[in-house]
Amino acid sequence: MKDFWKLFSSFFRVALRREMAYRGTFLAGIIGQWIGYGGTFLGIYIMVSSFRVLGGWNGMEVLALYGISLMSYAIGASFFFNFSHGLAGRIRSGEFDASLTKPIHPFLHEVFSAGYNVGYISHFTVSLVILVIALSHTSYTPTIWSVLFLLSAVLGASLIQAATLIASSTMSFFSVGSNPIADFLAYDIKEFTNYPITVFPKGIQFVLTFLLPFAFMNFYPAAALLGKAIPEGYPAVLPYLSPLVGALVFALSILLWNWGLKHYKSTGS
Amino acid sequence: MEKYWIVFKKSLKSELAYRSAALWGMLSAALGFLVQVFLWRALLGTGVRSDTSFPDMLLYLLINSFMLELTRANVAGMIETAMVDGTISMELLRPISYKGYMLSQTLGKNIYGALTATAPVLVLSLFFMPGAVLPDAVHILLFFPSALLGIALMFEVTYLAGLLAFWLQRCWFIRFYLYGFQSIFGGTMVPIWFYPEFLKAASYWLPFRYMTFEPINIFLMKTPVEQAWVPILAAFLWLVGLSMADKLVWRAATKRLTVNGG
């Protein structure tokens, strides 16, 4: 475990130095993402508040919903984005094969050497600011328990986001071209979670809860925090399961990745 | 003109090579549209606003996404890559304007995606909008110049921002600024008629609302015929002004550019 942290921190320092090489660009990128995501938050707020309510949620509540999702993406992706999106390229160029010869598990070596993505600090800061503003305008009251619950929910959500990235990179073991199926699962399906799932038909609610459990990322924990109804007939315990679901899908995604690795044949270059 | 046509065709052809990407693009567009359909059904179902009908809203979303898809360009990225690998020196030698070259390349690349991604969405939407009111002939006639100006304006802004690549080391973030300004001031996410007053007022001072919002307003007959000249003229003036600006920026950029070796 001590070695793990030593390894992680030395890889982390390298990643930070790489990003900071172009300081102006780094800053301009962060501001750009504030504006880009700020626009999305503003749009959602204008949309919901001009109709007062969306599926039982008001503008600020929907902002909190999206805030949790973006924050968990920032955390999950800062560790796994480079890894997930770089894997196909590293397999194509043959660099990946070097990971197989290292004295640590190839998965860990890939994650470490792909590097921590410092750029997600922009997603994190914008989502934190919006989440605090939004929650202070809702019925949410910060107590030790509700804050702990929120933190554990964000942790669970981050694990779901990470699992999505890990699972989608598994495709690279079978085809090194562009990866539209993975992108479809990872980005397009997730678009449903920007809004309360109660506005969608029953079939979609079922998929997002039991098959691709994206609803545990933000909908269920936010529903518990804000006292919102969950789909009719669903177990009342669901809003409290995010950390569990997160840990489960994270473990499953690593198993899937290792299964993919077993079927990997080097490109031989 | 013919040389631009060649660039357009070449760029279109290279897109045709990826058939399966088109399939997934189609699915992705359909799913994204489906999210919007349920979302707006829930919103309009509240009955709070009576100024927008469901079919109007769907038409708004469809035309908006088609126009955005058509002009989606990464000019900054293209210039950045060309500078890094040195192909920029070849591109500048060609007897063709760089802007025209970028425009034909962008359109060739996007037209395929716009048709394959939006066509199925159109079919899908027919199920949801039996009550759609199509515009009369005059509004359609006004819509086309307005939409063409909107598309030209969108490309113009993307191109102008893309020229910044000559000064920056990396420019992946430029599209975030454009995306943000478009969704804040251009109504690409929520129609401007839902905006609070201050934001509505601010949008008149920037070019973004003339890109997709005003053309669609004409199509939906929300702009009366006798007032349609205002947004069309405004779009035209923005286009002229920004074209002059891009010439100045281009001159400064090429003066600055040094290509090392080959």
Image (cartoon, rainbow, N blue to C red):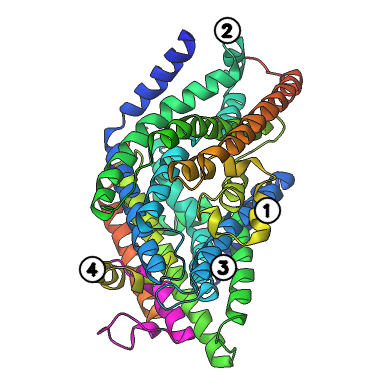
Tell me if residue A193 is in the magenta stretch. Answer: no
Crowding at dot 1, Cα within 10 Å, few <14 / some 14-19 / many 20+, comes out as few
Secondary structure beneath label 2 = loop
**How far is mark 3 from mark 4, CA to CA?**
44 Å
From the image, tell me which residue sits under label 1: B201
Secondary structure beneath label 3 = helix
* Relative image position of residue B209 (x, y in whole percent): 59, 44
* Relative image position of residue A179 (x, y in whole percent): 34, 44
Hey, what amino acid is under mark 4? Gly
- Chain where mark 2 sits: B
Hey, what amino acid is under mark 2? Pro
**How far is mark 2 from mark 1, CA to CA?**
44 Å
From the image, tell me which residue sits under label 2: B95
Q: Is the C-beta separation of discs 4 and 1 under 8 Å? A: no
Q: Which residues are magenta?
A: A212-240
Q: Are marks 1 and 3 on the same chain?
A: no
Q: Are marks 4 and 2 on the same chain?
A: no
